[in-house]
Amino acid sequence: MSPTKEDYLKILFELGGRTEQVPNKEIANRLNISPPTVTEMMNSLVKSGWVAYTPYKGSKLTREGTEYAKKLIRKHRLWEVFLVKHLGFSINEVHTEAEMLEHATSTILADKLEHYLDYPAHCPHGGAISVEHMDAQEVRTLHLTEAEIGVPVRISRIVDDEKLLHYFKNHDLKIGDPVTVTDKDSGLDLLTLHHGTSNKEIQISQTVAQYLFVEHI
Amino acid sequence: MSPTKEDYLKILFELGGRTEQVPNKEIANRLNISPPTVTEMMNSLVKSGWVAYTPYKGSKLTREGTEYAKKLIRKHRLWEVFLVKHLGFSINEVHTEAEMLEHATSTILADKLEHYLDYPAHCPHGGAISVEHMDAQEVRTLHLTEAEIGVPVRISRIVDDEKLLHYFKNHDLKIGDPVTVTDKDSGLDLLTLHHGTSNKEIQISQTVAQYLFVEHI
DNA sequence: GTTTTTATTTAGGTTACCCTAAACTAATGA
DNA sequence: TCATTAGTTTAGGGTAACCTAAATAAAAAC
Ligand SMILES: [Mn+2]
Ligand SMILES: [Mn+2]
Ligand SMILES: [Mn+2]
Ligand SMILES: [Mn+2]
């Protein structure tokens, strides 16, 4: 498996490809490549058994594809922990580094690294590290946009994208913070929430709020 | 620069390409690729300024090529130190892992890793890590085959190749050991040496002894 | 229920990195 | 010096991973 193909599987996983069919365009957007390239690659991934692809509908990961993606994400997150905890990188910097290291990591290396890090449960962005816990986290957490108004929740995960991380930092939102959604305005694409620790009112875009995951307290 | 091209530069460096012209065949042998592929790649490396190539004669690294190779080797060796000292890999295992990690390492990452490791002077195989010390080590050390008979020397570096490391381990030779060459037989390709610590006599092949570096005590 | 728009695929093309077979150059040695 | 051999290059070809332009299918709008 080439780094390129590994990244396709990972993106597919992140876009919900283990349960739903992901349209080509979403993959193309995420990876900044042209749609025909995605079609071509999906056919190739089908041939090697990682993906089930229905023309004009989209792609789903096979069981093998899902397993592969999870293992890759585990490596990615282990490196992130190492980079932040031991090398002193900031949370916003680690994604790019881990994006490369993940492809250069054997299973043995990942195992030894995990042992060395003392089996951390989450990456700096709140993502579950162990392959077994990834599904559980998926079930337990919900997008901030899905949280009911008035029900207190806790921020548990932030999708690790450079721009998003900056946006959330600028709005003083971080993992562990207790928040309560007080208003959702779809027309203005605005989500208003009450921030538990600072006791302040924060307004963020609903589009961006999709990438903030919370769980019930 | 692709991992492939980076490895070409590194091999060129290891084969003496910063001072002498390295013939295509040697590169082809080392990388297990066909000679025509090497010709093609050398032309490409010339175009980007890393290599000076004389058809039918061989390739030399330019100043820029040499610098690039050294930086890559530094990354390789830093990872080796990390893998052995912190993750508990054996000296024989680390080369393959580092061979991949080196290409996934930004300068910032290398710098932070070096700091974290507390600026080690050598990799587990005795190779100098700092770019400044690489040249000095090159000047100071000599191939075991070049050591004069009767003059005591110390093993300071072993070329990190899986098979070679096994060979040396099987013959109870490791970095730091004081040895004295007692006989060299070119016909039989044999080199006899007296091992200072164990007080035993050891016989190894001269071909292989080329990959053992020593310095005067 | 057409028409228009959007998404996807097909067709054809490029570059990087690999190959084998054949031609050629350079070194060796009779 | 001329023939053999070893090393290198040229010629031609393949796959992976990208692209644009054009054709086609599906969804949305009228
Ligand atoms: Mn990646
Ligand atoms: Mn993360
Ligand atoms: Mn390498
Ligand atoms: Mn080494």
Image (tube, coloured by chain):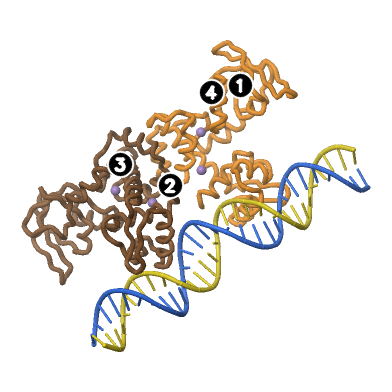
Chain colours: A brown, B orange, C yellow, D blue
Callout 1 crowding tier (Cα within 10 Å): few <14, some 14–19, many ≥20: some
Say what amino acid the circle numbered 1 marks. Answer: His
Sequence order check, earlier mark of 2 and 4: 2
The kind of secondary structure element at disc 1 is: strand
Q: Rate crowding at label 4 as few (under 14), some (14 to 19) or many (20 or more) other CA atoms within 10 Å.
A: few
Q: Hey, which quadrant is residue B178 in on the image?
A: top right
Marks 3 and 2: which is nearer the front? 3
Q: Amino acid at mark 2?
A: Ser
Mark 1 vs 3: CB contact within 8 A? no
Residue carrying label 3: A81
Q: Is residue A188 above or below residue D29?
A: above
**What is the chain identity of the residue bearing mark 3?**
A
Q: Of the residues shown, which amino acid type is indicated by label 3?
A: Val
Q: Determine the CA span between mark 4 and mark 1.
A: 22 Å
Q: Position of residue B141 (x, y in %)?
A: 61, 28
| Gap in angstroms between the C-alphas marked 3 and 2 | 17 Å
Residue matched to label 2? B106
The disc placed on residue B169 is: 4
